[in-house]
Image (cartoon, rainbow, N blue to C red):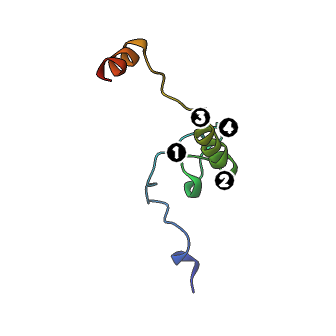
Amino acid sequence: MSDENTKPAANVAPLRKAVSCPICKRPSAREHYPFCSNRCRDVDLNRWLSGSYAIPVADDERKADEDEI
C-alpha cells in the first residue's frame, strides 16, 4: 500500500471553513465540528440540557398568549 492513498492531496479544498470553537475559541477539529474536542461538545450539550441557552420572551408575547386562553 502506498502513502499516496492515505494522505489528502494538497490541492483539495476543505469541506468546511475553519472556525474557532464556540466554547474555548481554539481552532475547531473536523471530527468534532464546530467544536475542538469532545469536552467542548459535552459542555455545550450540558448548557442546552440545563436551560442555560434560552430564547427570551417579550412581555407583549406573553399577553398575546393569555388573551387566547
Number of dots carrying numbers: 4
Mark drawn on residue 5:
none
- Mark nearer the N terminus (4 vs 1): 1
Separation of residues labelled 4 and 3 (CA atoms): 20 Å
Element type where label 2 sits in the image: helix
Q: Nearer the viewer, residue 50 or 1?
A: 50
Query: Going by the image, does 33 lie left or right of 40?
Result: left
- Mark nearer the N terminus (4 vs 3): 4
Query: Going by the image, does 61 lie left or right of 3?
Result: left
- The answer to the question of whether label 2 and label 1 lie on touching residues, with beta carbons closer than 8 A, is no
- Residue wearing tag 4: 24
Q: Amino acid at mark 3?
A: Gly
- Vertical position of residue 3 compared to residue 20: above or below: below
Element type where label 4 sits in the image: loop
- The answer to the question of whether label 2 and label 4 lie on touching residues, with beta carbons closer than 8 A, is no
**Residue drawn at x 56%, y 32% as measured from the top left:** 53
- Residue wearing tag 1: 18
